[in-house]
Image: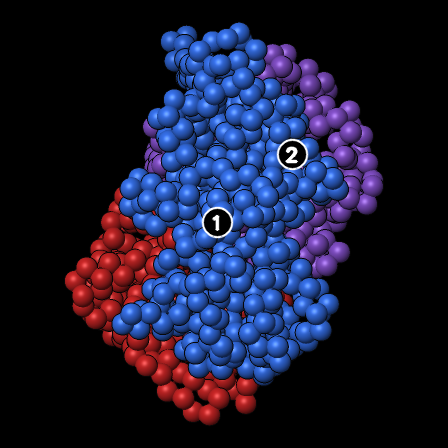
Chain colours: A red, B purple, C blue
Amino acid sequence: MNLLASLVDGLLIGFVYGIAAMGLTLIWGVMNVINLAHGPLIALGMFGVYLITTALGVNPYIALILVALVGLASGVLIYAVAIQRVINAPHLSTLLATFAINMIIIGLGTKVFSTSPYTIDFSLGSISIGPITILGTRLVAALAAVIVTGSLYLFLYRTRPGKYVRAVANNRAAAELMGIPSSRILALSFGIGTLLAATAGGLIATFFPFTILAGGAYELKSFVIGVLGGLGNPLGALAGGLVLGMLEGVIPAFLPNTWVPVLEFLLFVLILLVRPSGLFGAKR
Amino acid sequence: MKDRPSFASEAITAEREASVKLGLLRRSPGLWLTLAIALVVGLYPALTGNVAVREVVFTMLLSVALASSLNILLGYTGYVSFGHVVFFGLGGYVGMFLLSRGMGLWLAAPAGGLASGVLAFLLGKAILRLRGAYFALATIGINEAMRAFINNFAPFGGPTGISLNFQIYTGYGGAGQALWLTYYVLLGLAIVSLVLSYLVKTSKFGLGLMAIREDEDAAEVMGVITPNAKTWAYILSAIIPGIVGALFFFKNGNIEPNDAFRLHFSIEMLVMVMLGGQGTVLGPMLGAAGYQGLRGFLVTSPLFKDVQLAVAGGLLLLIVLFIPAGAVGWLRQHFPRLRALLP
Amino acid sequence: MKRRFAVLISMLMAVGLLAACGTQAPASAPTSAGNAAPGTGAASSKTVTIGFSASLTGASNVESTRQKNGLQLWMDQVNARGGVALADGSKVTFTAKSYDDESNKDRVQELYARLINDDKADFLISPYGSGPTDAAAVIAEQYGKIMITTGAASDSTYSKGYTLVYQMYTPASRYLTGALDALAQAKPDAKKLAVVHENDKFSTDVSNALKSYAEGKGYQIVLFEGYDTSTTDFGPIINKIQQAQPDAILGGGHFQDGTTLSKQLYEKKLSTQFLALLVAPPEPKFAELGAAALGVVGPSQWEPAATYNADAAKSAGIEWYGPTVAEFVKAYKDAYGEEPSYHAAGGYAAGMILGKALEQAGTLDTPKVKATLDGLDLLNFFGHIKFNTSNAHGLQIGHDMVYIQWQRGDGDKPTKQIIWPAAATTAKLTIPLR
């Protein structure tokens, strides 16, 4: 019975992990960039929802929509300022460019918010079924994650810009030959990746306390999830998030809790070695 | 990583010029220049006896040894090791464990290097099969798994780590003397790492590595036994960080998992190599000293101390955007005649 | 070609200068005026430089800043009074010199060496946190500088043979033992404990000490488990606690995980008699948890409601020194616009104890000041201060923790009450907590 409770907990949080990772893996898939500013962008999403909710007194979920839009815009901006120039330079340059963005966000964020924790005072009550207690905010977050994933799927497979994104991801040179404005598509992809990071952050902020440094842990988890679901496969990321959430829920039932990260990261390395295309991808 | 033929062929021809058969050192002014800079900077605190400067240079030399080692894998072989700090941390832990059991520094520090080398050997067999970002991610996974494991590993103190008694320094002529001692050893290690880097670069082995960097499959066809070459590059890049780790934590007096396996530090090592110019001997040294010097300046500058992190990030971004090949890479591109001086 | 060469040479020099400015520029900054070398005659005024590193960035930024504010307040007050009088009739005033340690210890030794050598710091205060303090202690001891540590509770620093390092805080080994005493008095039949703690040095040390203390008192530890520092979802741990059915839960770590754990324990409607967590509960911000904060007990180094006073000192037969609790609280509020936390009080007290030692020794001479500190035994607004001078030199043995509980106040708002030690209580411990 306890195991069931842990499982439910894990799965619910797994949905949110999933969208956080989706942003990272989308950016990787489309432009081969490992975005080291991912964590700080998640943290900015948290603070965005916090600021809008407390300053304007609106519902956090309305704030979340605003934050998502701002996230999209700032992603495009970051791409234009920091990534575009080095997108064709040696691989590592983009890594350093995004790391520089990371330092700038954390540096300014610490100045503005300090590193003390913030909480959004918001609750949707909870439902209890036997030993299982489910929080309303977490349920809504999981639901939101499903909606976001569904919209991303529709966007990528049913709209023209979405198809362009997939074409560029597949083969940028060929896409350019077909007349696809690859530069704009890359900017759009980075924007969407940032939007996803900010959204995940905003959802997390509705039930966990957070600091400006809180994104780091989710960034690491996103790496793990991205690999579980297949790097560059945004939809696999949701499944990867669920797997990770489940593991975090179930492992402590059998082992001391501190062994969770050991197993998590060993599994991560193992999957890279055995199935680099991810748990759900086609075998290479 | 693999799309710079011009830079590569330039590198290889320059190397060929530099390493014709005899008298390696006599015919390599670039190495002499590199070592001379390292020695002048390294001996300056010793000559003036200024301890504050020594501490600053200590941080720089530490980074020089680490960045220069990382460069063997990153710059020559083209494999981005994102979690290289794992070797620093493991070496530190093994060294501290032995020191706390009464072993002398002269054995404990090399033992740290050995442990890191063995780890690299074992890992190399497995993860060096991965390419590009997959390898980079695997090294992150290894570092995080190691950090989490040590956190649970009772012989190394788990989360509490290992502390040394202050008395241990009396065995090295007192605390003051011990700090000078670690400084000189570190200076020696930094120099060794530079010489090693140069020797690798100018050897046939190094040529094989650079062939792997440009096109691994082609290198294989050309007769480079790539798995072995890569594994050796990995081991060579791991040993010195292991020794340096033991030395650093000996000086610090205690070690904890979160200090030893700080992923952020790993990323900083990459930054240093890139700033100076990857795939060069001089580059990682300049990058490491420049980066640490700049950070040290910003941290202590009254003007920037509040926002020093953001300022450092802004400067880094400017450099990455406008000098992507790193300082030495840029110089080599713009002053072809100086290449012999800029290994 | 020659011209290009000249350009190149000048570039190289520029790079060299850049690297050099890291080492040189601050060195050439003027050191504090009239730096007091001991024995410079009967000059009427000297300035003592107090050096320390603070965490302007990184995880400890909030606590460290408060500590720094506290120290600064003491310095401003003492300077406004004209300083501390020495035996030779001269007066010393104080100035602070500090650098950002980024909340980690990579650069701590570099910064302390610079404080001592370049900035000519005469006395040192520790960084915030046990890890950085350990690293700084090596440097302090090596240069023969006295360092007062605050914001660093680890016991192990003082078992390493240092002779010049003095601790203000009650050490980690006594952090949670008082909470158990409070429980024992209020509910003697509660015997099953769950200890869940952050898996880092400080919290693990505290929890291990608590475990052996509890076992010695006949308690049964039904769950003893750590969690990773970055844990945000405590669901799995709470499920384990539920299974173990403890009478009381003790442990925790720092602010972030402590608040999250309290909140989730509440949300999961876990029923327990007693919940005591490290670090987080005494923080005023903890009240933002609302109903989830109610009943939570926490150890605090000091509280604004503390009752230390001159009478208590007299009945204990020791000296009373410095401002009263109310005077300190008011001065801090006036200066920084917020209620002082124990970090701030610790920072103020660290400076004050140093000042007291200088005044009593009547000199700036390190061996004499050290001897004075060794013999110090006094009560002040922060509590009782006395240092171990034998097997663990510098360890704090006088100071005690106070334990607070958040109880229902006006309009159901959580209010902080002191529930232990018995002499200082402002309310009775509520059991069960909710």
Decide: is A260 above or below C97.
below
Q: Quadrant of the rendered structure where residue B190 is?
A: top right
* Placement of the C terminus of chain C among the 4 image quadrants: bottom left
Tell me which amino acid carries mark 2. Gly
- Which chain is mark 1 on? C
Q: Nearer the viewer, residue A75 or C404?
A: C404
| Label 2 crowd bin: few (<14), some (14–19), many (20+), radius 10 Å | some
Q: Nearer the viewer, residue A219 or C111?
A: C111
Q: Residue at x 61, y 50 (%)?
A: C171
Q: Residue at x 55, y 86 (%)?
A: A2
Residue hosting label 2: C375
Q: Residue at x 76, y 47 (%)?
A: B97
| Label 1 crowd bin: few (<14), some (14–19), many (20+), radius 10 Å | some
Point out the tag, 2 or 1, that comes first from the N-terminus: 1
Residue hosting label 1: C308
Please indicate whether residue B107 sits to the left or right of residue C5 in the image.
right
Q: Quadrant of the rendered structure where residue A195 is?
A: bottom left
Q: Secondary structure at mark 1?
A: loop
Q: Secondary structure at mark 2?
A: helix
Label of residue A22 in the image: none
The residue at the far bottom in this view is A130
Residue A134, visible in the rendered structure: yes
* Placement of the N terminus of chain C among the 4 image quadrants: top left
Q: Are marks 2 and 1 on the same chain?
A: yes
Q: Position of residue B123 (x, y in %)?
A: 68, 55
Tell me which amino acid carries mark 1. Tyr
Q: Residue at x 24, y 58 (%)?
A: A51
**Mark-to-mark CA distance, 2 and 1:** 21 Å
Q: Position of residue B294 (x, y in %)?
A: 44, 28
- Which chain is mark 2 on? C
Decide: is A222 above or below C48.
below
